[in-house]
Image (cartoon, rainbow, N blue to C red):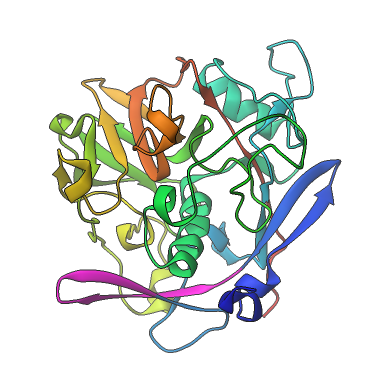
């Protein structure tokens, strides 16, 4: 038993079936960001506390949500035809791959009300919980290299985390809420209005480089109530964006790769696929692996998607 099994919010993570999809409920939590000797640290609380802010994964249209749901598996398609009506699902099986980014995201929206492709804030909320529980960012070492031996629930990934399978190292996953545009990183605002906000420059020299530090740029007021009155705020402290890189994997902070190119506008793929890497040990895969290498109407050979669903508005 893990120490975290009896600690919130980890103890309230649970698997459910919604609309026939196997999903994992991620309960709302609050975060306080600190730096110690130039190293970032994140404190997590399941309730409001002084100095803590709700994670943006639990914001929608300016309101706090009680939770969100993430697909337990990389998405498969409920229809064999690629069209506006394609629907993704989350059950053991062969993942959707090699479909353009835009269609992958739309296939999640088409499931029904509240369904969508797992976005950058949701993905990194899960990643933060994993980072804290595991004690470090390199899940390939701490949790184990992904091993995908089949398509049944029992052997699809022996290194699943709290009911979430294939979260890294299986397929790249189309991830909305973040993009590169004219060399600058654009992210959704932190209040859930899904308005893109221009943030920091990201060098094309980052291509195939390893994370060696996290970006902490933000334009928010530390007063939480003031933040909620505006919808054009960003805070990269809630995300895992490299502020510098390292060419040597063994000297890097996370062992994860960021890939960029010279596209005027590039969408985001996350998780990596581990292709052509012995035992998946290198950073073709990882929690923070980022690829800004295609436009929205292009695909990746191993590019898939993961469904998610918004929880109810929190009445607290």
Q: Is residue 73 left or right of residue 246?
A: right
- Foreground: 197 or 31? 31
Q: Residue at x 85, y 43 (%)?
A: 19
Question: Residue 108 falls in which quadrant of the image?
Answer: top right
Residue 120, compared with residue 275, is above or below; it is below
Q: Is residue 85 left or right of residue 200?
A: right
- Foreground: 259 or 93? 93
Position of the C terminus by quadrant: bottom right
Q: Is residue 156 magenta?
A: no
Whether residue 268 can be seen here: no
Question: Residue 81 falls in which quadrant of the image?
Answer: top right
Query: x, y percentage for residue 283?
Result: 34, 37
Hey, which residue is sitting farthest front in the picture? 279
Position of the N terminus by quadrant: bottom right
Query: x, y percentage for residue 204?
Result: 17, 29
Residue 275, compared with residue 210, is above or below; it is above
Residue 77, compared with residue 214, is above or below; it is above
Query: x, y percentage for residue 22?
Result: 78, 45
Q: Main secondary structure of the magenta part?
A: strand
Q: Is residue 145 left or right of residue 234?
A: right
Whether residue 137 can be seen here: yes
Query: x, y percentage for residue 239?
Result: 37, 55
Q: Is residue 149 left or right of residue 282?
A: right
Q: Residue at x 67, y 40 (%)?
A: 73
Q: Residue at x 69, y 46 (%)?
A: 72
Q: Is residue 39 magenta?
A: yes
Question: Number of callouts in the render?
Answer: 0
- Foreground: 67 or 143? 143
- Foreground: 193 or 83? 83
| Extent of the magenta region | 28-42
């Amino acid at each position: 038993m893990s120490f975290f099994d009896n600690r919130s919010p980890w103890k309230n993570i649970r698997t459910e079936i919604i609309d026939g999809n196997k999903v994992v409920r991620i309960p709302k939590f609050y975060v306080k960001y600190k730096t110690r000797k130039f190293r970032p640290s994140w404190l997590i609380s399941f309730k409001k506390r002084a100095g803590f802010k709700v994670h943006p994964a639990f914001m929608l249209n300016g309101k706090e949500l009680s939770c969100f749901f993430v697909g337990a598996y990389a998405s498969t398609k409920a229809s064999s035809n690629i069209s506006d009506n394609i629907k993704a699902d989350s059950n053991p099986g062969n993942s959707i791959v090699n479909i353009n980014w835009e269609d992958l995201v739309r296939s999640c929206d088409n499931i029904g009300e509240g369904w969508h492709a797992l976005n950058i804030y949701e993905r990194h909320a899960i990643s933060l919980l994993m980072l804290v529980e595991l004690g470090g960012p390199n899940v390939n070492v701490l949790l184990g290299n992904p091993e995908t031996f089949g398509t049944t629930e029992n052997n699809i990934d022996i290194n699943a985390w709290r009911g979430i399978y294939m979260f890294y190292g299986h397929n790249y996953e189309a991830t909305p809420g973040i993009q590169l545009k004219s060399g600058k990183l654009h992210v959704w605002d932190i209040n859930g209005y899904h308005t893109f906000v221009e943030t920091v420059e990201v060098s094309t020299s980052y291509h195939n480089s390893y994370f060696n530090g996290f970006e902490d740029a933000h334009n928010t007021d530390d007063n939480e109530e003031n933040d909620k009155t505006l919808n054009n705020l960003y805070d990269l402290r809630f995300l895992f964006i490299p502020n510098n890189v390292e060419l040597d994997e063994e000297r890097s902070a996370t062992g994860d790769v960021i890939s960029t190119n010279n596209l005027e506008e590039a969408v985001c793929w996350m998780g990596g696929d581990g292709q052509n890497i012995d035992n998946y040990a290198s950073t073709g895969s990882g929690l923070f692996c980022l690829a800004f290498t295609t436009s929205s109407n292009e695909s990746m050979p191993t590019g898939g998607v993961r469904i998610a669903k918004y929880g109810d508005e929190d009445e607290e």
